[in-house]
Amino acid sequence: MVTVTEARSNARDNRTAAHSHIKGLGLRDDGYAAETANGFVGQAAAREACGVIVDLIRAKKMSGRAVLLAGGPGTGKTALALAISQELGTKVPFCPIVGSEVYSTEVKKTEALMENFRRAIGLRVRETKEVYEGEVTELTPEEAENPLGGYGRTISHLLIGLKSAKGNKKLRLDPSIFEAMQKERVQVGDVVYIEANTGACKRVGRSDAYATEFDLEAEEYVPLPKGEVHKRKEIVQDVTLHDLDVANARPQGGQDIMSMMGQLMKPKKTEITDKLRQEINKVVNRYIDQGVAELVPGVLFIDEVHMLDVECFTYLNRALESSISPIVILASNRGQCTIRGTEDIVSAHGIPPDLLGRLLIIPTVPYKPDEIRTIISLRAKTESLTLEDEALHSLARRGENTSLRYALQLLTPASILAKVAGRQEIKAIDVEECEELFIDARRSAGIVSNGTNFMS
Ligand SMILES: Nc1ncnc2c1ncn2[C@@H]1O[C@H](COP(=O)(O)OP(=O)(O)O)[C@@H](O)[C@H]1O
Ligand SMILES: [Mg+2]
């Protein structure tokens, strides 16, 4: 039996935080890009090409192939890859890595690649569970003499009353569930959800019967659950194959203090063996055959693909052929360069010809000044920052002269400077001050190569 409930998605969300304004490719029904839509501005041809890729994926015509986004830094390559995964549906895994990430002393390169392949393959598991769900009308712990003697008293049962749209039910629950409820801080008037088999319990929210008109609390109000209190409910869980690997590799730690300390002190890499993966694949395949689960291939995005070496490319070639493979999107801002791991074989983007032959290549182009402007103001809106017109102008100019990313990166520090000065709005002087504090790469390199002594 594969542990599913233990699995928790550890997708590295923070990597995509800079793209939180991107909600999709922003294509119209006819497949053409709207000027500004879904948070995307300009880069029309590349967006349309990505739309075709999405169609190919849906038609299952991408197997054995991959996509390469080629273009300068800050031209939206990562954003496009993320948008493709969003177009494929909600809960489609998106796993962004950088080519150089596969080199570590702990794990083999191909092993690291394999791990990321599995992070990019989702599994949707449907389970029918017996549950109790309702608004808590009563919550009474029943005490008893401690059976072990002594003076203490213990909780022998928990009496709980639950109300749903169709009925009421009183349950007598095990004391362990009482503890779980205390942890979730369940009170009368909350809507809870208890799994009958495992006793797992979850506070869903506050019943909206208790909502007042003027409420300042950060409380989530939920409606009274429909149907009976006791019912069978279909639970859908989305996990990645990597989540399953991790959940099943970790020795299920005990509750005793030593193993808890151990977990705190050593967040060590868990050993995931090939054998374990094969076992998991077997169970996953069985779930799929039984119709309990469904594979959701996601997007594996490998940035700076020229950092991979021949061995990794060989692995990639093979992995693309596999029947369970995610959509692989590569990105590069290099032109001709030597393939890593070879003496002197020069190839486009540092990718060997046999892999190049499998790629659909999409170029991205630098942005026009007004596009940069729109992107910056979009980003400011997403971060709830207000920009004075002149500040926007000044940032946009920096975007043109250096890079879009540099301009976007100045946004947050500039907002901090504005706040320090007691203003809500970012002014041009904040941007200028930031520019003095944080220089862009070209200026930085210039200073160092001119031999300016930082110490003097
Ligand atoms: N066309 C666009 N519309 C809106 N935002 C964009 C666009 N292109 C890039 N961005 C944003 O600009 C920043 C840099 O883009 P990114 O995708 O990281 O570039 P690259 O991967 O090509 O270096 C990101 O925050 C991204 O979301
Ligand atoms: Mg990028």
Image (cartoon, helix red, strand yellow):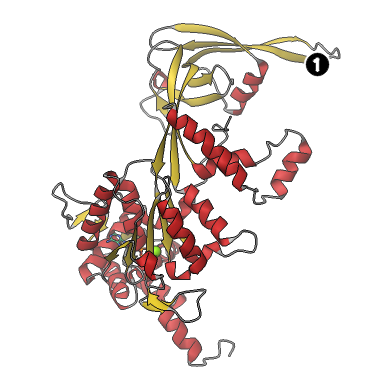
Q: Residue at x 49, y 48 (%)?
A: 118
Q: Position of residue 349 (x, y in %)?
A: 38, 73
Q: Position of residue 322 (x, y in %)?
A: 43, 49
Instruction: Give left or right: position of 173 versus 222.
Output: right
Question: Of residues 390 and 16, which is closer to you in this image?
Answer: 16
Q: Is residue 309 visible?
A: no
* The quarter of the displayed image where residue 66 is located: bottom left
Q: Is residue 295 visible?
A: yes
Q: Position of residue 348 (x, y in %)?
A: 36, 74
Q: Residue at x 36, y 70 (%)?
A: 73
Where the N terminus falls, by quadrant?
top right
Question: Of residues 183 and 19, which is closer to you in this image?
Answer: 19
Which amino acid, mark 1?
Gly
Q: How many marks?
A: 1
Vertical relation: 430 (above or below) 327: below
User: Which class describes the residues within 10 Å of circle 1: few (<14), some (14-19), or many (20+)?
Assistant: few
Where the C terminus falls, by quadrant?
bottom right
Direction right: furthest residue = 150
Direction left: furthest residue = 30
Question: Of residues 49 and 184, which is closer to you in this image?
Answer: 49
Q: Name the secondary structure under disc 1.
A: loop
Tag 1 residue: 152
Q: Residue at x 37, y 78 (%)?
A: 336
Write down which quadrant ligand 2 falls in. bottom left
* The quarter of the displayed image where residue 369 is located: bottom left
Question: Of residues 354 and 256, which is closer to you in this image?
Answer: 354
Vertical relation: 305 (above or below) 6: below
* The quarter of the displayed image where residue 427 is located: bottom left
Q: Position of residue 234 (x, y in %)?
A: 42, 22
Instruction: Give left or right: position of 259 versus 246.
Output: right
Instruction: Give left or right: position of 283 versus 177.
Output: left
